[in-house]
Structures are given as C-alpha cells and as structure tokens.
Amino acid sequence: MAASSVVGPDGKECCHYGGRVTTFVVLSCITAGMGGVIFGYDIGISGGVTSMDPFLRKFFPEVYRRMKGTSVSNYCKFDSQLLTAFTSSLYVAGLITTFLASWVTSRCGRRPSMIIAGAAFLAGGVIGGAAVDVYMVIFGRVLLGVGLGFGNQAVPLYLSEMAPPVYRGAFSNGFQLCVSIGAVAAHLINFGAEKIKGGWGWRVSLALAAVPGGFLTLGALFLPETPNSLVQQGKDQEHARVLLKRIRGVDDVSDEMADIVAATQQAKAGRGLQVILFERRYRPQLVMAVMIPFFQQVTGINAISFYAPVLLRTIGMGESASLLSVVVTGSIGLASTAVSMSLVDRVGRRTLFFVGGAQMLVSQLMIGAIMATQLGDQGQVSKAVALVLIVLIAAYVAAFALSWGPLGWLVPSEIFPLEVRSAGQGITVAVNFLLTTFVAQSFLVMLCHMKSGIFFFFAAWLAIMTTFVYLLLPETKGKPIEQVGKLWGQHWFWKRFSGTEEEGRTTSKLSSN
C-alpha cells in the first residue's frame, strides 16, 4: 500500500490518505489517455503532410512552386498564410470550444466531455481523409480542434483526480506520454504514407486520426466518473465513497472523502471563473494558470513540432529524409517523457523544470548559432552540419519532454481547489490554445523575417521562464490534490494573498451582485 501526507506549517502531518495503484485506475487512465494520443497525433501529422509534395500540389500549389524554385530565400519558401491556416485552424477551434468545455466538464462531469471529444475526433478524421479541396481539409481540422477543446479540458483533470496522491505526478505525466506516443505514431505514419505511390498517402495520415478518436469515444462510455466530480455535481456521496474505495483499493478513504466534500461545500459559495478572476486568494493559481501554458508555448516546442519536417527541408534535406529524422527525434522525446514519469514524484517538479530549461536553452542557442553561420538565403548546409542540427533538435525535444512538456499540463491540473478546478483548467487550456494558435500562425512568417534570430528569441524566453519557476513556483510533489492550496500560504511571495480578511470582503461583494 502507498500512502501520502501533507506537512503543515508546524512540521506535523496534517492528513493521511491511504491507497494503492489499482488495475481499475490504470485501465481508466489508459482509456482517458487516448485524448492525449490524439493531441500528439494532430500536432505531428500537420507538419508531415505539409512537407509532402502531393499534398502541397493539390492544396497549396503556390508553396509547392516556391519550394521547387531557387529565387526565394530558404527561410521564406513555406511562408503562406493559407498553409499556416491549415495548421492553426485546429487550435482556433480548440480555443473557442474551451469555454463551452469548461462548463460541460464542471456541470456534467469529466466523462461526458471525453465522449464529445472522441466523437469530434472521429468526425474530423473522416472528413480530413476524404477532403477534395482546401476548405474541406480545414473543416476537418476544425472538428479535430473541437475535440481537443473538450479533451484537453477533461483528460488532465480526470488523470489528476483518479491518481493516488503519491503517484499523481506520474499519472498526470501520462497525458504528455500519450501526446508523445501520438506524435511518434504520426511521424511513422507520415514516413510510410509518403512512400505510397499515386500521391494519396496524405489521406491515410489525416484519416487515421479517427482511430484513437473511436477508441476514446467507445472507452469513455464505460469509464467511471471521478468521485470529485460526482460530489461536485451533487450526486449521492455514498456512491462516490464506494467508488473512491474501489479506485484506491482500500476501505478507509475517510480523510480524502472529507477533503472532497469540504472543497465542494466551498464551491457552492463560488462562481467558478468569476471567483478565480476576482478573489485575491486565488491570485497565485490564476498567475500559474496563465503563465505556465504561456511559457510552455514560448519554449518554441510547437514551432519544432508543427514544422520540423518543413524546417529540415529548409536546410536542404529531402522529403523522406526529413520525415525519418522527425521519427527519430520524436522517439527520443517519447523516451524522455517516460523518464520524466519515473522521476517527477522522486525529484519533484522544480528540479525537472530547471534541468530541462537549461538543456533547452543551450540547444536553442546552438541551433541559432549554426543556422546564422551556415545557412544563407540560398544554398544548403553540408550533411555534417545537418546531422549536428538534428542532434541538437533531438536534445531540445528530449529536454522539453522531460520538463515543460508533461509539467506544463501536470502543475496547472493539480494546483486548483475543487471549487474552481474546472474554471482554472479552462483558463489553462484557453491560454495554451491561444499561444499555440499564435505560434502556428506566425512561426513561418517569423522564420522568413527573423531567420536564425527566431531561435535566440525562444532562448531568451527559456531564461525568463526558468527564473520564474525558481522564484515563484512551490514544490507540489507528494501533496494530496485537495491540500495543495495550503502551499501558497507558506510561500515567501504568495503568502500575502492568503489573508482571510480580504477574501471575506471580496466574497461578500460578489455575493451581493
């Protein structure tokens, strides 16, 4: 049996949760993790198909002509607003959907949101694979974005609430592991689809998004709701208690159940998004809900994920070679995510943030320096230089998968009390989609105008975000999810926001409106 405890300001243990990792929990989380697989697949698939000649010829002929010509700068060959619209439409739809998904996840539960997500993924994959014009392709991406809006809202919360506290980091990092699995699957499928004679391999790549969507839809129909969500919805507490016993594999769940009920009672006095935005006591969580997904995106990872094949073709690699290189770097990222899962509950979140941030910073600086000195507007780099760039990209992806990749989803999902958890996750997902859309829509333009300077731009942000974590993020390792809120009152900076007097005034003001 595993147990976890929270240590109060006086150094004494203030609560004790019993529990172990049960087969029931593992199977439930694997099914929910299909949402992460689809997220990773959708990220990986777009960069691959947009580097395929048949796909470009059919939907983006202007880009294809520029890619084959010699009069356009290496950095500008893929600069097309229509091409970036294909990529970013997924995230615009996800951003808009997030607000509805937050309400559904809070009022109806995590499970219904996952069912909706799976159905949208299924429809989007079918339409994308059958597309006959660019508008149909983009519509398929929009439906996939709707799925991401619901899936990214519900799945991280589901994993955090189902996992035993002492293993919550590993379970929640399972979301990023699933994202990495999906991305690697996309790279492998792109590599194989590119070789299909007849030029229709891109249809296979786009249509296969429906497969994990089908698994998520079917699996979610049989998943249990989390006890936290059942109590939040006002369902029978005894039913929630029985379910919690089954999840934890022990008979005594009184401490954890008491915390869930207490958090729900507090939630009845709150108003979700309004409360988290205006109540002073939630200021630390609000800052983290905005800044962590913001920093996750300005690491530059999605620029690499979306456009890695395009970037490698920019330096002169062939279509097949660029796709194969992305398979290799994606596999390294997958392995690093597994390492992160094994370490996060041992060494803590902050340590992984520091190690990963430092490695990403060095990698970005070296990539920028090599691009600046070796790649001009015309010509190609040597094979040796191309190999070095691939190694550096792999090192960068590995560092992200160790740190900001999984932790960017884990930390926001575990820092909110139940009364504002769905609203807080909604803010996190909305900021993530907003920045993802910006990166997807602007990267090729920035690459064209900033050239190698774009990598120094991302490196500067890496230095800033690592400093932010050092100064402002407390360690949440091993803390039960309904007790994490106490950490803010012990933090050197955030403790000024934990005063009850100001909370009372704010709550009274909101209640009177």
Image: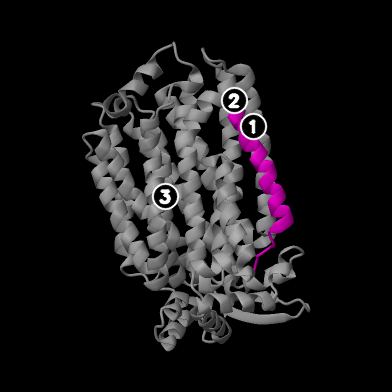
The residue indicated by pointer 3 is 39
Judge the density around disc 2: few (<14), some (14-19), many (≥20) Cα neighbours within 10 Å: many
User: Which residues fall within the magenta stretch?
Assistant: 452-478
Give coordinates of residue 450: x percent, y percent.
57, 26
Asked if the residues shown at circle 3 and circle 1 are in contact, with their CB atoms under 8 angstroms apart, the answer is: no
Residue 34 visible in rendering:
no
Viewer-nearest residue: 284 or 477:
284
Q: Residue at x 37, y 45 (%)?
A: 90
The residue indicated by pointer 1 is 456
In the rendered structure, find residue 172 and report the number of the disc placed on it.
Answer: none
The residue indicated by pointer 2 is 452
Q: Please identify, in this view, whether the residue under mark 3 or under mark 1 is nearer the observer.
A: 1
**Amino acid bearing label 1:** Phe
Give the side of residue 281 with respect to residue 495, left or right.
left
Q: CA distance from mark 2 to mark 1?
A: 8 Å
Q: CA distance from mark 3 to mark 1?
A: 27 Å
**Amino acid bearing label 2:** Ser
**Amino acid bearing label 3:** Phe
Task: Give the structural element (helix, strand or loop) at label 1.
Answer: helix
Give coordinates of residue 306: x percent, y percent.
45, 37
Give coordinates of residue 388: x percent, y percent.
60, 26
Q: Please identify, in this view, whether the residue under mark 3 or under mark 2 is nearer the observer.
A: 2
Judge the density around disc 3: few (<14), some (14-19), many (≥20) Cα neighbours within 10 Å: many
Task: Give the structural element (helix, strand or loop) at label 2.
Answer: loop
